Amino acid sequence: MYEREAPPEGGEHAIKLGPMILSGSVEQQQFARFVAKGAPVQQPLLTELATRNVPGFTSLRDWFQHGLTIVGPSDPYAGLASELLENSSLRKFYGDMLSAMGTGVSNVNVLKDKNLDLDQFVSAVSISAMPAQQIILEENGKSVSRLKIVLEHSTRSGSTVAFPPAEESDGTQRLLHLLPVLFHGTKGQCTVIDELDRSLHTSLTRRFVEEFMTMASGALSQLIFTTHDTNLLNGRLVPPGSIWFVEKDDDGASHLHSLAEYPAAQLEHLEEGYLQGRFGAIPFLAHRDNLGWQAGEPAA
């Protein structure tokens, strides 16, 4: 679509239109150049082009707003309790997936406390921010309802024991807020997950990726995730072209390179080769004996 480059010394940005714009009419190209030329350097060019209705850019902006989801390492899934309450298909999906992933959870339910006195919930905003609870203001404006997620476990005797998410392991809690990626994220969206493996056993992380690839088969969906789990480098989970390494240089700038850049002969014993530094992007740690911290000596 375009490239925009800021000169190191500041000043006017250099803008180069891409083939999707240059394949349009001369009038469209001139209009795009005019808008790009007058765009403030502090403002995203995409916003300016879409706001001025340059053909092709409104849909691109809409994709960033609605087709791209970014999940941080500790991000809760907003509105999970109410969505689980209203969507029986999602509840069943949660129960099936949590059971299949060995968490011990057999079913997910949502309890609703109705018509609670609003004066008792002065801190409703902070309560509603809790991942396992939501506060909903009723239509009368004078009362609230509280939604609480409960996770049910089946015992040998056939009875059911319910636990709040806070009493589950960190891995199970993490899955609660990742499963919507599988339920919703395979419908033509791009989802970026930072530190997918946080609090997850390596088998769970691998299973999550496998489930996404199976469920998204044939769909225009993409999962991009960062991880420090070297067990995923088994050469079978994803193709080499989908694996990228991030490495910092001496100036602290990050550089990316793909596993596909290496010859096939170097891809045998992939995890072992990575840990040996064959592909870079690995920390080289100073030996503790050289730190000098115990004797108060300067580090070697």
Image: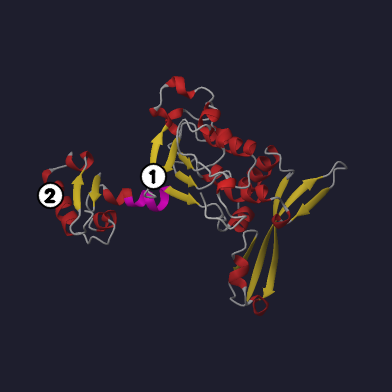
Which region is colored magenta?
61-67
Residue type at mark 1 is: Asp
Question: Looking at the picture, how far across and down is residue 292, in whole percent?
Answer: 57, 52
Q: Is residue 26 magenta-colored?
A: no
Q: Within 10 Å of the Cα at label 2, are there few (<14), some (14-19), or many (20+) other Cα atoms?
A: few
For the residue pair 166 and 117, the one nearer the viewer reads as: 166
For the residue pair 130 and 201, the one nearer the viewer reads as: 201
- Residue at x-position 51% and y-position 32%: 274
Considering only vertical position in the picture, is 31 above or below 120? above
In the rendered image, which residue does mark 2 sit on? 30
Left or right, 245 with respect to 131, comes to left
Task: State which mark lies toward you, 1 or 2.
Answer: 1
Q: Within 10 Å of the Cα at label 1, are there few (<14), some (14-19), or many (20+) other Cα atoms?
A: few
The residues bearing labels 1 and 2 have C-alpha atoms spaced at a distance of 40 Å
Q: Is residue 138 visible in the rendered structure shown here?
A: no
In the rendered image, which residue does mark 1 sit on? 249
Q: Is residue 225 visible in the rendered structure shown here?
A: yes
Residue type at mark 2 is: Gln
Left or right, 221 with respect to 200, comes to left
Magenta part, dominant SS:
helix
Q: Give the mark nearest the N terminus, 1 or 2.
A: 2
Considering only vertical position in the picture, is 242 above or below 148? above
Q: Is residue 62 magenta-colored?
A: yes
- Residue at x-position 43% and y-position 41%: 246
Q: How many marks?
A: 2
Left or right, 299 with respect to 134, comes to left
Dot 2 lies on which element? Answer: helix
- Locate the N terminus and report the quarter of the image it occupies: top left
Question: Looking at the picture, how far across and down is residue 43, in whole percent?
Answer: 27, 60
Question: Looking at the picture, how far across and down is residue 128, in whole percent?
Answer: 60, 66
